[in-house]
Image: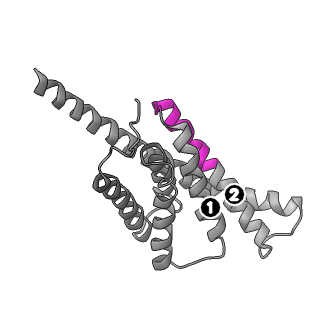
Amino acid sequence: MKISRFDHTTPLLLKVGIACALIAFVFVARITPHPANFAPVAAVALFAGALLPRRWAPVVPITAMILSDLVIGLHPLIFYTWGSFAVIALASSKWLTNATVIRVGLSSMGASVFFYLVTNFGVWAEGTMYTMNVNGLVHCYVNALPFFRGTLTGDLFYSGVLFGAYAFVSHLVRENKASAIV
């Protein structure tokens, strides 16, 4: 499915509305009870990168993280978490302009792995929980594996929901246009 990226011809109100809806979605999902790491942030970063103008894409997950972290609580890993989602959004703006099921699935899994590697490196680099050597880094990554399951399943689930809903709505719009012409 070809994602029609919003550009200068897309009404500003639509772009802002979609961005705000995605931010609200992440905010609500993060502040309500959910399984560990099962959140839509990476999926929203992927979707924003595929749909919104490139410079808008990282703003959506970062804004959602700022707002929800202000409620949940700020933490010393902000640079790693927020930065990961910004990079995911920027990368998807290149990779997901032609969003097939395979590309969305691979991007979602790649985002999960990227987030896992970067944020757990941050946990290790903080220097308070693990020894500052290769063994400490490996120990950190091993101890984080149970959380990776929630990250991966959440990213795959929410990516499927967002891109699937977009494909469904796009199909309905195309059908409406086609039937209006006849």
x then y, percent, for residue 71: 45, 78
Q: Is residue 122 left or right of residue 66?
A: right
x then y, percent, for residue 22: 38, 57
Determine whether the residue tagged by mark 2 lies in a helix, strand or loop: helix
Residue at the outermost front position: 8
Type of the residue with mark 2: Val
What's the residue at 52%, 43% (across, down)?
93
x then y, percent, for residue 165: 32, 42
Q: Is residue 105 left or right of residue 18?
A: right
Q: Which mark is residue 118?
A: 2
Q: How is this picture coloured?
A: one colour
Determine whether the residue tagged by mark 1 lies in a helix, strand or loop: helix
Q: Is residue 18 left or right of residue 135?
A: left
Magenta segment boundaries in residue numbering: 98-113
The verdict on residue 45 being magenta is no
**Residue 58 seen in this snapshot:** yes
Q: Tell me the residue that label 1 is attached to.
A: 83
* Image quarter in which the C terminus is found: top left
Q: Main secondary structure of the magenta part?
A: helix
